Amino acid sequence: MAHAHSHDAAHDHHDEKPTGIKRWLFTTNHKDIGTMYLVFSLIMFFLGGAMALAIRLELFQPGVQFFDPAFYNQMLTNHALVMIFGAVMPAFVGLANWMIPLQIGAPDMALPRMNNYSFWILPFAFAMLLSTFFQPGGGPAAGWTMYPPLVLQGGNSFPFMIFAVHLMGASSIMGAINVIVTIMNMRAPGMTLLKLPLFCWAWLITAYLLIAVMPVLAGAVTMLLTDHFFHTSFFNPAGGGDPVMYQHIFWFFGHPEVYILILPAFGIVSEIIPTFSRKPLFGYDAMVYATASIAFLSFIVWAHHMFTVGMPLAGQLFFMMSTMLIAVPTGVKVFNWTTTMWRGSLSFEPPMLFAIAFLFLFTIGGFSGLMLAIAPADFQYHDTYFVVAHFHYVLVPGAVFAIMAGVYYWLPKWTGHMYDMKLANWHFWLSTISVNVLFFPQHFLGLAGMPRRIPDYNVQFTDWNVVSSIGGFVFGFSQLLFAYLIWKCVREGQKATAEVWDAKPAGLEWTVPSPAPYHTFDEAPEVR
Amino acid sequence: VATDVNDRSDVGSRRARARRMSVVLALVAASFYVGFILMQVMGKH
């Protein structure tokens, strides 16, 4: 990473900021907007987590004990929508808002007013989605995939859900445009593309993915809307339409979406591992090309989600092979992270602990993904808890752990305080142990044939469900430590230095004081 | 997109380039939206 000189010490007097509610409503400051995204995502994480706990409570024992099956379906659907679009994606956008300008030496995002709009759309979108719980018929219950014809029977909640999804998509597209325009136009002099921090690279590629696929989701749900209210027949066989076509369109969005949820995580981990290994990242260029390759391949694998729908043998072979091909660039990344640590002078601060856990546990999710890529095997695994275990390994100890690693890495830079390391270690160990207790048994349940998306099950599945639910409750309540730790760090703590970590992290963000002043890089730094 | 990162003097042209790039990206997104719907409308049934 290049070294840089910052002139910010001379600009500390620029740190005046507006106060009161207007600061947050009308702000165009990337740090304020980043903070709002992160707080919003934490709230959504707890809301989606509460729904997950409701699901695990119901599944603690066979039989229907706590919730009506229709309400269970609503919990399941909204858990996914809230976690994907409300927790994980906004958390990455929040980190992007905070860190991209600081990492490229820019004073702010390129389109600050649009940045404000793209955040403030989100609370309205989720208020609309979640308000359906208080309407007759309750919330949407057809799963986050919204397959017709089931979703068309959704009652009052259906148009609310569709409009909410449109708003979330618009917010994501605006955020993506902002990221691309910022990185392409506002880099400090001397910062060529191949000197860009990997978090920025990962986000740049993610932003292109977002622009390509969020409109496809919007198109799909618009067609659902017109099928329901305007008597079109896009997905209705009685009028010449095809419900399977919806699945193709949805997954043309859905698979790149998986990478939208994981590529920024790769970027975060690529920042943390070199710092706490006290070595430069092994194979920087290869990491960039691997990220771009994963993004490209994500467009040609979508039908592996629908092997069981039926498709020609050539189609099955194509989608099976292309899916397996993704293991190559992903393997390059895992190899490079491991090689960065090899013979490094490692230390195990909380960000590094979460990054190492990510490395191991995301790889488990990757391996089970390879198992699912094998078409004949997928016929057995499809719609079982094996799939649930697979994508939760990718998204929880994968994406969510990377977000936590990022928060633990940059939190002192944001607040100006070091956080309680002991508490952070407790949070790490409780989370890492319990997340495995929660999700690993779900592999066994799936292989034994337990179907997903059901509130009741055969008694033979009881034992592992009990274990999984216990893990779920421990994991869920452990996250309260995380919230408390952040709250405590904002209020008090040992003063953080500009570099924060003894490991001497590289990057422009460590050249500004902690907490980062309200306005940074009024004068562009020189990158050598 | 070519970006002259060393050019600090021409703020105006950089601003214009940023605006142009945002419009192009928004149009790409809009064309994906319309394109996928049109593909369905015009497909054989």
Image (cartoon, rainbow, N blue to C red):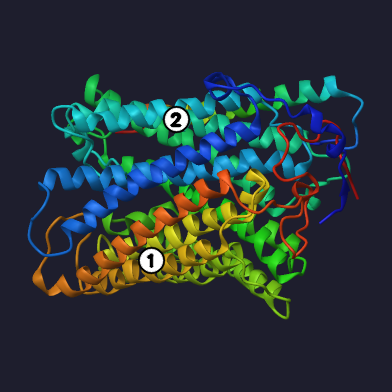
The residue drawn where x is 61% and y is 52% is: A493
The residue located at (54%, 32%) in the rendering is: A173
Q: Which residue is mark 2?
A: A122
Nearest to the observer: residue A508 or residue A154: A508
Chain to which mark 1 belongs = A
The image shows a total of numbered marks equal to 2
Residue A394 position (above or below residue B28): below
Q: A54 left or right of A207?
A: left
Q: Position of residue A281 (x, y in %)?
A: 73, 65
Q: Which residue is mark 1?
A: A435
- Left or right relative to A273: residue A51: left
Q: Nearer the viewer, residue A411 or A96?
A: A411
Q: On screen, A503 above or below A400?
A: below
Mark sitting on residue B45? none
Instruction: Label 1, secondary structure: give it.
Output: helix
Query: How many residues crowd mark 2 within 10 Å: few (<14), some (14–19), many (20+)?
Result: many
Q: Are marks 1 and 2 in contact (CB under 8 Å)?
A: no
In screen coordinates, is A47 left or right of A432?
left
Local packing at callout 1 (Cα closer than 10 Å; few below 14, some 14-19, many 20+) is many
Q: Is residue A262 left or right of residue A135?
A: right
Looking at the picture, how far across and down is residue A433, in whole percent?
A: 40, 71
How far across and down, in percent of the image, does residue A301 sit?
46, 55
- Residue type at the position of mark 2: Leu
x and y percent of residue A263 in the render?
57, 53
Q: Which chain hosts label 2?
A: A
Amino acid, disc 1: Val
Q: For numbered disc 2, what is the local secondary structure?
A: helix
> If you read the primary sequence from the N terminus, does the residue marked by circle 1 or circle 2 appear first?
2
Q: Residue A223 lies in what quarter of the image? A: top left
